[in-house]
Image: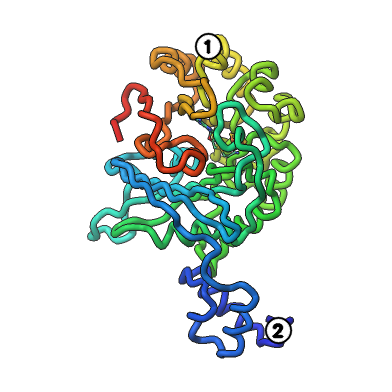
Amino acid sequence: MAGLGERAYAAKQVFDWIHRRGVVDAAAMTNLSARLRARLTEGGLAPGVVVPERVHRSADGTRKIAVRLRDGALVETVLLPAVSGSTAEPDADAAAADDEDDDGAASSPVATDAPRTRVTQCISTQVGCAMGCVFCASGIAGLKRHLGPEEIIGQVLLGRSLLEEGEDLRNVVYMGMGEPLNNYDATARSLRLLTHPDGLGLSTRRVTVSTSGLVPEIGRLGADFGGTVALAISLHAADDATRSALMPINRKYPLAELMAALRAYPLPKRRRITIEYTLVAQRNDDAAEAKKLAKLLRSVPVKINLIPMNPIDASSLGPPARDRVLAFQKVLTDAGYSCFVRRRRGDDVSAACGQLVLIGAKPKVKGFRAAGETPG
Ligand code: SAH
Ligand code: SF4
């Protein structure tokens, strides 16, 4: 604003319009002068940064939104309402940002009101992804470009505008398309905006960054945010040979380095790192692998989410049989870990990371469900 010769207070007003009211069209910012509105519009503060192209609603209430960006690229964001009546362990992707040391399950700020539904939003940070994980649609597509912070935060503003009656946006997880730490500056800026008290005001511990394990950037994130941003690590294997075969990034940052980075992450007391483990039949689903995992994770406070792989068009890999999943889980729970089997929500509208965008409207996957899960 100083650069435009405006008073500094106008910056506050514009910030409030965008982040609190979700208005990104300068022309609609009625408390600004007409001159400033015109200049901001010229500068690009106009609608169209993120435009919902398709919204797929699945039976479990999950909404997957294909988002069109200004250059025509598509990314996806997903709204995941907590399953009604669920308690301390929220479902699916929300798991990483779980509420274990929070104010109790499904409580409403005003006790007499109808209970409110907590929604977790999953957002993308890149168009495609450079990491090339063999089970991932985004990885197979390759990296097209990074998103800017306005496109990352724009997904959240859009998501908030699509909330339904009784829903509150509670958690944001960076688990959509792309590797957030491979787009560090935009990711960090979006984290600051999401958690800004004058904007959406989410608490950092309700925001989870999921990474395939970029060691230097894990250190940077820990330093920049004092360890308060919740961290999810896509591990998917407990030895280097297995992990490198699934995730090429492991050749650059092998397990010993990754584990050292996790031990060094300045995690606040009582918080844990989420370990994501996508189970791929014949690749990483053996009970022996679970035993190795139990040993590997001993020195780090973690909770483990097992995600049976969602089949994707571009790969013949798939999830293990249910008894294999349960046997794998049992090894870890017997070893004393908190370990849950997650299904990726919205199975009937193509659930795996990046799939909605990459395969268009065509639903492919009929969900694999582990014991104890209710159909969506
Ligand atoms: N790039 C980051 C965040 C996006 S991917 C990361 O890899 O952590 C979010 C999660 O979805 C990761 O744990 C990833 O391994 C998982 N995922 C990707 N494709 C999947 C598939 N086909 N089935 C199950 N999980 C998948
Ligand atoms: Fe990228 Fe994550 Fe997919 Fe790997 S799993 S290719 S890091 S988006």
Q: Which residue is drawn at 24% across and 60% down?
A: 113
Helix, strand or loop for disc 2: loop
Quarter holding ligand 1: top right
Q: What residue does disc 1 label?
A: 286
Q: Residue at x 58, y 58 (%)?
A: 151
The image's colouring method is rainbow
When asked about the image quadrant of residue 208, the answer is top right
**What amino acid does circle 1 point to?**
Asp
Residue 91 seen in render: no
Q: In this view, does 98 lie above or below 327?
A: below
First in sequence, mark 1 or 2: give its number.
Answer: 2
Q: Nearer the viewer, residue 91 or 156?
A: 156
233 sits to left or right of 360:
right
Q: Where is residue 335 in the image (x, y as percent from the top left)?
A: 51, 17
**What amino acid does circle 2 point to?**
Leu
Q: Where is residue 229 in the image (x, y as percent from the top left)?
A: 59, 48
Q: How crowded is mark 2: few (under 14 residues within 10 Å), some or many (20 or more)?
A: few
Q: Position of residue 299 (x, y in %)?
A: 64, 25
Q: Residue at x 61, y 21 (%)?
A: 237
Q: Is residue 69 above or below residue 264?
A: below
Q: Is residue 200 above or below residue 53?
A: below
Q: What residue does disc 2 label?
A: 4
188 sits to left or right of 324:
right
